[in-house]
Amino acid sequence: MSQTFRHPDILKIAQREGKVTVEALADHFGVTLQTIRRDLTELAEANKLERVHGGAILPSGTTNIEYEERRNLNQPAKLAIAQACAAQIPEGCSIFMNIGTSTEAVARELLRHRDLMVVTNNMNIASILVENPECEIIVTGGALRRSDSGLVGKITTDTIRQFKFDVAVIGCSALDQDGDLLDFDIQEVGVSQSIIHQSRKCFLVADGSKFARTAPARIASMRDLTTVFTDQAFSPGLAKRCAEWGTGVVVAC
């Protein structure tokens, strides 16, 4: 396979997995390690990937991946995470669910839950849960962000402050090894901080690719969460911090 044909496939794998490794790509394409290193260097020079030791990750910085592309990334992992999270949400409770493809996956797993009240600033989640007749849905209002059908801004945060939720289910754009949740949109950060403050329990749903990315705005620390649902074990250092903070970590298979 020529370089011209490999590059789009490498990008598709990176978008699906969040990162690529030289050895795995060499095996996949049946070429040498040096050939793959050259491919990754060229993709990095074109600002399509960012080189790291042993491979490459999606570019980091101040711009998020398009929402439709994010929805297609790591779908098996998101499904496993969503199922694990939904299993710990009792029937007969109030929930806030924010913007994100992982929180949307959780919403699909709640379609058979009964006696729920879900408040959301995610129009997609409202559309998903309308199929559950046992679920009361409240949409916060706010400024519509057309890229992902999310609602943000002062109206959104003012609405959130009128509630005390039993459970919040939130996502984020990136995680770092200090245990900080990161995002790109400062307005969404303010919404997420309000959600955490107004919730008795707060669940984060985030697949392992979030550790391969970064974003400029800090939401909170994992110390502020009840449980993190992910698909990859944390590094020993971060796992130790979570244990010290009393933050649960569920690794979904």
Image (cartoon, rainbow, N blue to C red):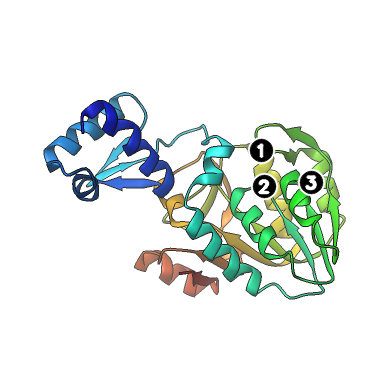
Q: Which of marks 3 and 2 is in front?
A: 2
**Are the residues tagged 1 and 2 within 8 Å (C-beta)?**
yes
Residue beneath label 2, please? Answer: 99
Q: Residue at x 36, y 36 (%)?
A: 11
Secondary structure state at the residue bearing disc 3: helix
Q: In this view, does 107 lie to the left or right of 220?
A: right
222 over 148 or under it: above or below? below
- Amino acid type, callout 2: Ile
The picture places residue 187, in percent across and down from the top left corner, at 69, 38
Q: In this view, does 178 lie above or below 100?
A: below
Q: Name the residue under label 1.
A: 148
Real-space Cα separation, disc 3 to disc 2, in angstroms: 13 Å
Q: Where is residue 239 in the image (x, y as percent from the top left)?
A: 42, 69
Residue under the point 32% across and 24% down = 46
The kind of residue tagged 1 is: Asp
Query: Is disc 3 in contact with disc 2, using a CB cutoff of under 8 Å?
Result: no
Give the percent coordinates (x, y) of residue 122: 73, 46
Q: Quarter of the image for the C terminus: give it.
A: bottom left
How far is mark 1 from mark 2, CA to CA? 8 Å
Residue 128's label in the rendered image is: none
* Location of residue 81 by image quarter: bottom right
In the visual, does 170 lie left or right of 43?
right
Residue labelled with disc 3: 157
> Tag 2 or tag 1, which sits nearer the N-term?
2
Dot 3 or dot 2: first in sequence order is: 2
Q: Which label's residue is closer to the chain start, 1 or 3?
A: 1
Q: Quadrant of the N terminus?
A: top left
Where does the image place residue 29, in percent across and percent down from the top left? 22, 43
Report the residue that reaches farthest toward the top.
46
Amino acid on which the number 3 mark rests in the picture:
Thr
